[in-house]
Amino acid sequence: MIKWFRGYCRFLDYNFASHIKDQMKPTFTDEQLVVQLSESNKRAFEEIYDRYWYKLFCISFHQTGSREEAEELVHDLFESLWKRRLESKINHLSSYLVIALKYLIVNHIKSQITWRKYQEYVLLNKMHEISTTEENIEFNDLSEAIDKAMKKLPEKTSRVFQLSRFENQSVKSIAKELHISEKAVEYHITKSLKVLKDNLWIYQTDN
């Protein structure tokens, strides 16, 4: 059954126009579809997929900012819906799907909070605190200190950090642009964060 589900999802071409068209001509009510889904009716599942895919994709994309991640999360949601079709208690289909998706999104975001991202958060938080301390350190001084710290980095490490933090590119995108592995990108980012933290300690405030 799962093989069929994956094949169905892989070969269907979803775009805005087709979804609007599908939604304009509903074959069954949501309640009827839920009943048929619990009876393992594949056509009912396909109807639910067609009816709600675009709405769920928009929610997921808004939260993740990544088309690839958004599509994957929606795919996981529908795969779970099919797997649990016999045990799920669905009173309101639309609400059920949206809530289930939001749980998936929250768990996905939590899984992305690695130690490296935590270190980055702490560093950026410290830099933000500088502008609100009693010492009132000038931003230009900090900017100059950051520039000096960046110059201490190897050329490739500095480039990776700039693409990641100043141009907001993903690890995958940076790896492709610089022709290096994603693990190498992670290494360069971690290295640059350590150098910046070590060189900006004088600007940090005690909590």
Image (cartoon, rainbow, N blue to C red):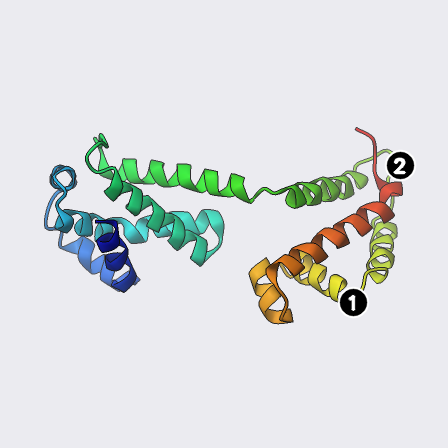
Q: Sequence-wise, which precedes: disc 2 or disc 1?
A: 2
Is residue 114 shown above or below 184?
above
Left or right of residue 71, residue 45 in this image: left
The quarter holding residue 163 reads: bottom right
In the image, which disc is placed on residue 163? none
Asked whether the viewer can see residue 97, the reply is yes
For the residues carrying marks 2 and 1, which lies nearer the camera in this image? 1
Instruction: Residue 60: give x, y in percent of width and height.
Output: 41, 48
Give the structural element (helix, strand or loop) at label 1. Answer: helix
Task: Name the residue type under label 2.
Answer: Glu
Q: Name the residue under label 2.
A: 135
Is residue 14 shown above or below 36?
below
Look at 30% across and 63% down and name the residue there: 15
Look at 60% across and 60% down and name the residue there: 182
Cα distance between the residues tagged 2 and 1: 34 Å
Q: Residues within 10 Å of mark 2 (few under 14, many from 20)?
A: few
In the image, which disc is placed on residue 155? 1
Left or right of residue 183, residue 52 in this image: left
Q: Residues within 10 Å of mark 1 (few under 14, many from 20)?
A: few
Look at 87% across and 58% down and name the residue there: 148
Left or right of residue 25, residue 98 in this image: right
Task: Name the residue type under label 1.
Answer: Glu
Instruction: Residue 162: give x, y in percent of width and height.
Output: 71, 61
The quarter holding residue 161 reads: bottom right
Left or right of residue 194, residue 182 in this image: left
Instruction: Residue 207: give x, y in percent of width and height.
Output: 79, 28
Is residue 179 shown above or below 16?
below
Look at 47% across and 43% down and name the residue there: 108
